[in-house]
């Protein structure tokens, strides 16, 4: 599509599973997108989707109104923003460029990145997403946004192309804060729902009977009614397709590690969160990384069959040990 009036020039960096379909939706809406990814295969795949690309990140950023990043981690983001010797994206962009980061990263890293962008004379927004690859392709993501009122108003029309809902959560970093708090609830509640189904199996309850009661009672939650960990009651849930994601175990483990960092640095006396983080670390390390996180129910069944009793600790993984060492 030709660029329309009101079209913006958007440097889109990080054309992976999420970034490529998000960039494609911006192209389809008539914006001038210049994409870049450090992995040549991702760049080629983006070109095949019709996304114009640049030879490097700095070329993409020069002349952009908006620099949108969709990276694996906060380290990737800060490295890219600052470069090896303050010769990164912040230095290359025109003054007043709007830096919009949609990656899921630590709250402190998001605040640091925003401060650096503002100090360099730019505008900064953190807007992590939920909705996964399916939502990125369909343009139905939810964005959790940390920004000033003005910067939120400036990015809202772009977010409306890539998503269905944007919630302004507060100032810089508030989007990341909302994302990890939500996923802390989600990770813990999926374990609770899964333990209840395994207990129900032992007690002779059918999956449908437990679902019919809990979904209409106080056990109701998204983990049960949308992403039910047993096949049958919710036909669209990943359990009906052998736990093909959905939301992969590796991403749940990542997000709970981000939540752990925040719980630790803010002195929250949490008990369920650290245990959930350890449980998903083990799940991801033992074959669940690419499976939907609701596949945790198979781990509970396996551990039950092996005679592991209630409250017996999962063997800490290297990642969990490392976290303990860092605490
Ligand atoms: P991905 O690994 O598929 O894509 C990230 C891309 O960033 C990679 O292609 C990588 O090469 C590129 N990259 C890294 N550094 C770069 C740089 N300096 N310049 C240009 N490109 C660079 O990851 P993804 O699944 O697309 O996820 C992206 C982010 O979205 C992550 O933070 C993830 O936690 C979050 N997220 C993912 C999902 C999901 O379902 N995949 C859902 C919600 C949120």
Image (spheres, rainbow, N blue to C red):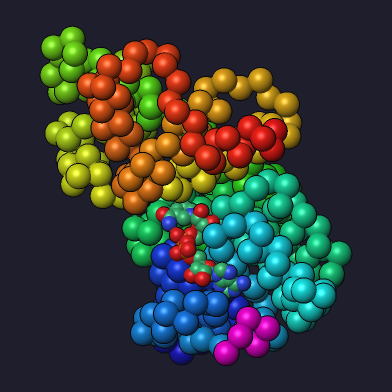
Q: Position of residue 265 (x, y in %)?
A: 73, 34
Tell me where residue 28 sits by quadrant. Answer: bottom left
Is residue 210 found left or right of 23 in the rendered image?
left
Q: Position of residue 240 (x, y in %)?
A: 17, 42
Is residue 171 found left or right of 203 in the rendered image?
right
Q: Residue at x 41, y 51 (%)?
A: 131
Q: Is residue 284 visible?
A: yes
Is residue 165 found left or right of 99 in the rendered image?
left
Front position in the image: 224 or 76: 76
Q: Position of residue 283 (x, y in %)?
A: 38, 38
Q: Position of residue 144 (x, y in %)?
A: 57, 49
Front position in the image: 138 or 194: 194
Whether 58 is among the magenta residues is yes
The vertical placement of 96 against 75, above or below, is: below
Placement of the N terminus among the 4 image quadrants: bottom left
Tell me where residue 32 sits by quadrant. Answer: bottom right
Q: Is residue 29 visible?
A: no
Whether 135 is among the magenta residues is no
Q: Residue at x 14, y 34 (%)?
A: 232
Residues shaded magenta:
55-59
Placement of the C terminus among the 4 image quadrants: top right
Magenta stretch prevailing secondary structure: helix
């Amino acid at each position: 599509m030709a660029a329309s009036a009101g079209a913006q020039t958007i440097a889109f960096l990080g054309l992976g599973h999420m970034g490529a379909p998000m960039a494609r939706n911006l192209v389809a809406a008539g914006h001038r997108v210049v994409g870049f990814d450090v992995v040549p295969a991702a760049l080629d795949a983006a070109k095949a989707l019709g996304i114009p690309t640049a030879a490097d990140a700095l070329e993409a950023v020069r002349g952009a109104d908006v620099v949108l990043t969709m990276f694996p981690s906060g380290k990737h983001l800060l490295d890219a923003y600052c470069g090896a010797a303050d010769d990164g994206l912040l230095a290359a962009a025109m003054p007043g460029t709007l830096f919009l980061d949609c990656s899921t990263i630590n709250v402190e890293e998001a605040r640091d990145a925003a401060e650096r962008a503002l100090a360099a004379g730019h505008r900064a927004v953190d807007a992590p997403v939920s909705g996964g690859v399916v939502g990125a392709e369909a343009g139905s993501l939810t964005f959790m946004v940390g920004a000033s009122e003005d910067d939120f108003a400036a990015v809202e029309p772009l977010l409306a192309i890539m998503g269905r809902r944007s919630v302004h959560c507060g100032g810089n970093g508030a989007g990341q804060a909302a994302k990890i708090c939500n996923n802390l609830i989600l990770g813990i509640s999926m374990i609770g729902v899964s333990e209840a189904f395994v207990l129900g199996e032992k007690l002779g309850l059918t999956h449908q009977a437990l679902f019919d009661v809990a979904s209409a009672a106080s056990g109701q939650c998204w983990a049960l009614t949308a992403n039910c960990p047993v096949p049958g009651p919710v036909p669209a849930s990943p359990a009906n397709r052998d736990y093909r994601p959905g939301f992969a175990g590796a991403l749940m483990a990542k997000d709970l590690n981000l939540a752990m960092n925040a719980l630790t640095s803010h002195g929250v006396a949490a008990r369920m969160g650290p245990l959930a983080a350890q449980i998903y670390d083990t799940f991801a390390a033992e074959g669940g990384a690419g499976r939907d996180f609701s596949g945790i129910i198979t781990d509970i069944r396996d551990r039950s069959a092996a005679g592991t009793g209630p409250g017996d600790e999962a063997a800490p993984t290297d990642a969990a040990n490392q976290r303990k060492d860092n605490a």
